[in-house]
Image (spheres, coloured by chain):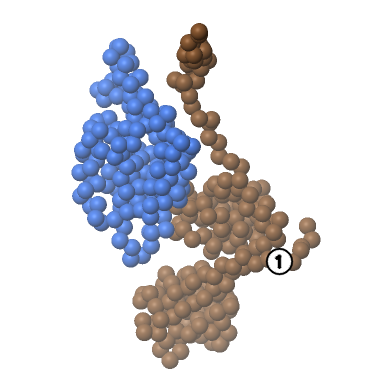
Chain colours: A blue, B brown
Amino acid sequence: MNVLQSVKNLVRSKSIHVAYVDVGSCNGCDIEVLACLSPRYDIEQYGIYVHNNPREADILLVIGAYTPGWEEKLHTLWEKIPDPKVAIAVGNCPISGCLFNRPHSLIDPPVSKHIPISAEVPGCPPRPTEILTAVLSVAPIVFKDYEVSKR
Amino acid sequence: MSLPIIPYLQEIARLEWLHKFFFVRTAPLVTPSYSRGFPELTNKTCTHALFCMMACPAPGAIDVIKTPDGWEPRIHKGHCIRCGLCVEACPNGVLTSGRILESMFNDSTRLSFSFRIDVDTNLCMGCGNCAVACPVNKLIDTQMAYGGRASTDQLLLKVSDGKCHVLHAELCTGCKTCENHCPNEAIRVSRLLEAVQIAEVEP
C-alpha cells in the first residue's frame, strides 16, 4: 500500500459527492432525500455533499419507477459520472415499480435493467437514516483502494 | 484593565472544546420503537386465512408460503410500503409492526372487509371465464369446477342472456381470480376496507 493510495482513501472517505435523479417518482422519496440535508439528519457532517451535477458526483441516487421519457437520458447521465462511481436505488419504485407497477402503466422497472445498481434501499419512502446508512456503507466498499482493485 | 477577549481565548483553547468543535456529530439516530417498520412475525400460528394478502395495496408485497412448520406470511422488501394493513387485517395476530397491535387492542378496533364486483356490460361478452374460474363458484357447484354449465342460482357469478351477472356479491372473498381470467377486462373487484369498533371483548 503506497502513501498516495492511503491519502486518496482518506480524502475519498471524507468527501462523497452525491447527485440524485428522479426518473418518475411521486416526490415522496425526493422529500426523504431532502430531509437528509436538514439539521436533524445533516449528511454533511459525514462528508456527503449533494451537488446534483453528474460530472462531479461519486454516487448517483436513482429515485422513481423509470418512465419512458428517461429512455436514453438516464444512460447518458450515468456515462457522464467519472469513475469510481456507484448508483443507489432509493425507494421501492426503482426496485419493483411499487404501486405503479400495474397493467397499462407507462413504466419500465427495475432501473437495474438500464444502469448498474449497486445498492437498493427498500421502503415507500425509506427513512432518511436508511438512505444515509446505504450511502455510508456502499462508499467504502467501492471507493477504498479503487486504483488497486481496478487492476 | 483586562482585555475581555482573554477569557474567550481561554475558553476556546480548551482541548475539550476544540474536540467538540471539529469532531461534532449529532447523536446516533435510532429508529424509535413506535416506528412502523416492515412487518415481522410473532409466534402465533398462521391459519392461511389470507386476509393479509387481501388487504395489501402493493402488488406482490406479501405471500403466504407453506413451510415444513405450516403456513407463514413472507414480506417482500422492495414491494412492501409499510402501511401496516396486513398487521391490522390478520385475525390471528401473526404479524407485528410498531405499535399497531397494541393500539388496536386499546381502541378495540378491527378491519372489516367487503367486496364489490363491477361488470362493465359494454365490455362483457358473456364468455363465462370468470364464472368458471371463480373458486367460490367451484365450491358451490362442482359442475362449474369442470367448466360445465351452472346448475343452481346460488352462485356468485353466472352468465345469462349473454352477460355476466353478479348474483350473491356477499360470497366474494376478494381473490380477484375473475379479474385475471377476463379477456376483456370487463370485470373489476374493489375492496372496501373499513375500520370498525367492536364491543368490549373478553380477553
Q: Position of residue B103 (x, y in %)?
A: 67, 54
Q: Residue furthest top?
A: B1
Residue denoted by label 1: B198
Q: Quadrant of the C terminus of chain B?
A: bottom right
Residue B24, compared with residue A69, is above or below; it is above
Callout 1: helix, strand or loop? loop
Structural crowding at the residue carrying mark 1, measured as other residues with C-alpha within 10 Å and reported as few (<14), some (14–19) or many (≥20): few
Position of B123 with respect to B42 (left or right) is left
The answer, for residue B41, to whether it is visible in the render is no
Residue A82, compared with residue B94, is above or below; it is above
Position of B112 with respect to A73 (left or right) is right
Q: Position of residue B98 (x, y in %)?
A: 60, 48
Chain under label 1? B
Q: Position of residue A27 (x, y in %)?
A: 38, 52
Please report the residue visible at 58 percent of the width from the left and 78 percent of the height from the top. B170
Residue A150, compared with residue B79, is above or below; it is above
Please report the residue visible at 55 percent of the width from the left and 39 percent of the height from the top. B31
Quarter residue A10 falls in? top left
Q: Nearer the viewer, residue B70 or B86?
A: B86
Quarter residue B111 falls in? bottom right
Q: Amino acid at mark 1?
A: Ile
Q: Tally the marks.
A: 1
